[in-house]
Image (cartoon, grey):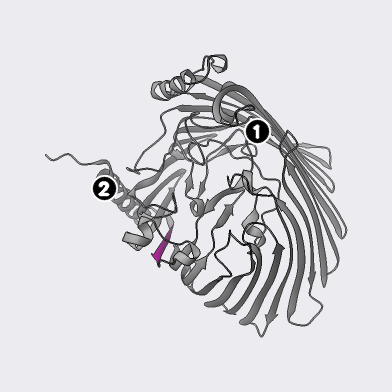
Amino acid sequence: MRKINASVKGLLLAGFFAHMATTEASAQGGNLSGDFMMNYNFFMRDTSIRAGNNPLYDNYLSGGEGWLNLRYAYKGFTGTVRFDGFHNSNLQNPTSALSAQGIGQLTLQQQVKNLTITAGHVYDQIGSGILFRAYEDRGLLIDNALFGFHLKYKLNDNWNVKAFTGQMKKIAQPITFNTYAPIIKGLNIEGDVQVGDKLHLTPGAGVLNRTLDQNSMSQVVNSINALDTGMRFTPKYNMYAVTAYNTLSYGPITWYVEGAVKSQEAILKPDDKTGNQELQNLSGNVVYSTLGFGVNKFAINASFKRTENFAMRTSPNETLLNGVINWQPIIARMRSQRLISRYSPASQDLSELAYSFDAFYNPSTNYSFNAAYTDIKRLDNLQLYREVYGEAEIRSIEKVILTLSVQYLEYNQEVYQLKPGVPMIKALTPMMELVYKINKKNSVRGEFQYMDTKQDYGSWLYALVEYNIAPNWSFAVSDMYNVKPHEGVSPSGRHYPTVFSAYTKGANRFSLAYVKQVDGINCTGGVCRYEPAFSGVKVMVTSSF
């Protein structure tokens, strides 16, 4: 009999699982649900905006990705299977194509009284995720699932404990059950305690261990042997990390604090003398805290984080977004406005000292105000990011919602976008958004933004007009214009237009867009990556059932 490869096995497994779920659901009253998502791009070469000179524009001309997720639940049992397909996809690397398909997730879970047993792909976290976070973000092609076993036991009404072991998922060909080789193990205890009438505590603690495989250790040893004699050290197979955290709620006050430390291990870090990326034997730590206070019409939020050498990866050989086993909370607010979102800062796992303040004031239902300040530095005091932001929302005009905002920004492009020798970006951006409700079904929304800066591409003007017909249709036209281009950086003043339409019917949504996009940063959930320019057509289909 001919040998069946892993992808075919995955397809057969997906079909069998779906058939079993459908049969059981109809016969015994279980519940079958799921969702589908597909993106497809048609690449239209435009070298004037630097969209070209790679296989996607020169040869393939189209590509995309899709996910079909099925979930079946019956009498304490839950089974989830997801098929992933990447066909000349630009998600993993925007300048090259990824083609792979197979079972992206297979999870089996059974509840046995107070014990929940999970096998397969596990998505969970310890605390805020600083120590460990297995999660998915399709927009950035992050799927950091733990493939292994996960146990959660409810000790009583106030306390539970969980333990897990396995390997982190790796997105590569073949997709089905592909993992990084090192082994991850963890233990976590969490509580929920009411003290008196007003004080509420949710404490927790966790420990994590990562053990390198022989091949990963051999690569580490080879890298260390290539160093100067005085920089060499003996690497360790095992890394250990612990964290403790608590959320305190007392009346109008909510305070979260977490501290984590990790043992010495080989991590990739720039050498202080040469500036070159070298393996160094370092321990790490993180302190993270948020404080919220709200009373009557006023509220304030404050955040703080200090990070030192807290790289948490499957092995020191992995870089960028590869092999990450944790998630560093980001202190800066992720802004959705088109121009300022280009300069969103990513969390730094080696050296960061960050804090932010947000104040909110709502004197009436017709007015609301927000003021914010964020400052992020390296531990050596190098400025990375600074933001001063103000916003006012006005609802006093009938059928109109008017939002006025302004941002002053300082952004270290050399660090965040790895562009050596470029100056700190300093930008002032006033913005306006206006929503006019014509009637119960029809509305018009407009956005207008102007970014004044002498760095990077120079100054920008952005305008958008969107027309919505609830609950089915949405249309939008926008343009991003390089009104004052920076000589030598921007290819003269350019327009970057987008024409968008979407149709929604029940749980199905279809969208079509013609897009010209300048290169820049794309951020989701505090994780950011640089993307080159795009020119072409984007199609998206989503559905849930």
Label 1 environment density (alpha carbons within 10 Å; few <14, some 14–19, many ≥20): many
User: Residue 271: horizontal and vertical position, in percent?
Assistant: 60, 28
* Residue 455 on the magenta span: no
Q: Disc 1 or disc 2, which is closer to the eye? A: 2
Which residue bears the numbered disc 1?
190
Quadrant where the image shows the C terminus? bottom left
* Residue 40 on the magenta span: yes
The kind of residue tagged 2 is Leu
Magenta-colored span: 35-43
Residue shown at the point (40%, 35%) measured from the top left? 179
Would you say the magenta stretch is mainly helix, strand or loop?
strand
Query: Which is nearer the eye, 513 or 376?
Result: 376
Q: Is residue 290 above or below residue 191?
A: below
Residue 12, numbered label: 2
- Mark 1 and mark 2 residues within 8 Å of each other at the beta carbon: no
- Describe the element under mark 2 as helix, strand or loop: helix
Query: Which is nearer the eye, 522 or 70?
Result: 522
